[in-house]
Image: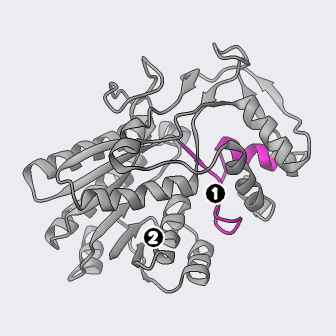
Amino acid sequence: MKVLVTGGAGYIGSHAALKLLELGHEVAILDNLERGRQEALDTIKKQGGDFEFLKVDLRDLSSLQQALKGKEYDAVIHFAAYALVKESTEFPEKYMVNNVIGSQNLFQTLMENGITDIIFSSSAAVYGTPAEVPIKETALTHPESPYGTSKLIMEMILKDYCTFKDMNALALRYFNPAGSYQGMLGERHQNETHLIPRLLHAIIDPGFKFAVFGDDYSTPDGTAIRDYIHIMDLVDAHIQAIAYLKKHKGFDVFNVGTGKGSSIKEAITAAEKVSGKKLSYEQGLRRAGDPSVLVADAGKIKAEMDWQTKYNLSDTIQSAWEFEKQRPSTDYV
């Protein structure tokens, strides 16, 4: 099978590309390397073998059309997007241009080339603050950030193309991906905002300030609860999704999470156990808009794709720790 992976030099995309290569598939990676990293591509090639690389910006429609002209792919996994919630609230226009217009350019170009099967990297951010937890796919969608809005708009575009054009697509709504592939590939966002890498970096660097925002939530220990999924469990969901899409036409959405929540304090305890070191952190106030609990109801993907998670929170943090120990400190400047 030949698969196009957009954003394949980024965090989730690089792990997916490597896994596909290890399974014997032919892979093409499309990335403009604005936020993706050449180091990730080098690791993929070293560990998984050769692949086609297309350095293209999805916002440049003519260049994209030229790059994909005459190409044939059995499936496309579309990861390429800006993905920082706080940044999206500061620069919403950047998120709409990059995520929405860039994706529309991709979908248009794929249709022009008769490429019809797409797995779309969506997000639990489309739900906003849920009325009920665990969150089902049937829950109301009311995103509370431009990032979440951009993901929901792309889902709507895909649904229409599946209804009125010859396209088939699945949107996978992720909860909180974390961890690494054997310490070789891992999470490397510039100015890191995600919890697990930040708390691990604070253990490594005592001068790095790590704060817990809120200790008065309606949870057993007072800190917010989130659903942390190991990056390789998430990748496996994409592999299963491709096979599912070959047998089921149209459009559908699936949550991808463990279905189990862990509090911030539980994550800290697990990180201390993995590292063998204590974490010194500051206690801060709640951040506006942070829900008490965000946990997936993953029953649908488990039932329809026979997908199961293999890793628990400790496994996820252990793998993240192996990567974090060798991660450049400049990522946190």
| Drawn side of residue 121 relative to residue 280, left or right | left
State the residue at coordinates (49%, 86%). Answer: 50
Residue 66 found in image quarter: bottom left
Check whether the beta carbons of the residues at disc 2 and disc 1 lie within 8 A of each other.
Answer: no
Compared with 195, 100 (above or below) is below
* Residue on which the image places disc 2: 32
Viewer-nearest residue: 123 or 1: 1
- Residue 192 colored in magenta in the image: yes
Q: Which sits earlier in the primary sequence, circle 2 or circle 1?
A: 2
* Residue on which the image places disc 1: 187
Viewer-nearest residue: 112 or 265: 265
Q: Is residue 234 visible?
A: yes
Q: Secondary structure at mark 2?
A: loop
State the mark number for residue 155: none
State the residue at coordinates (45%, 64%). Answer: 7
Give the magenta part as a residue range.
176-201
The 10 Å Cα crowd at callout 1, few under 14, some 14 to 19, many 20 or more, is: many
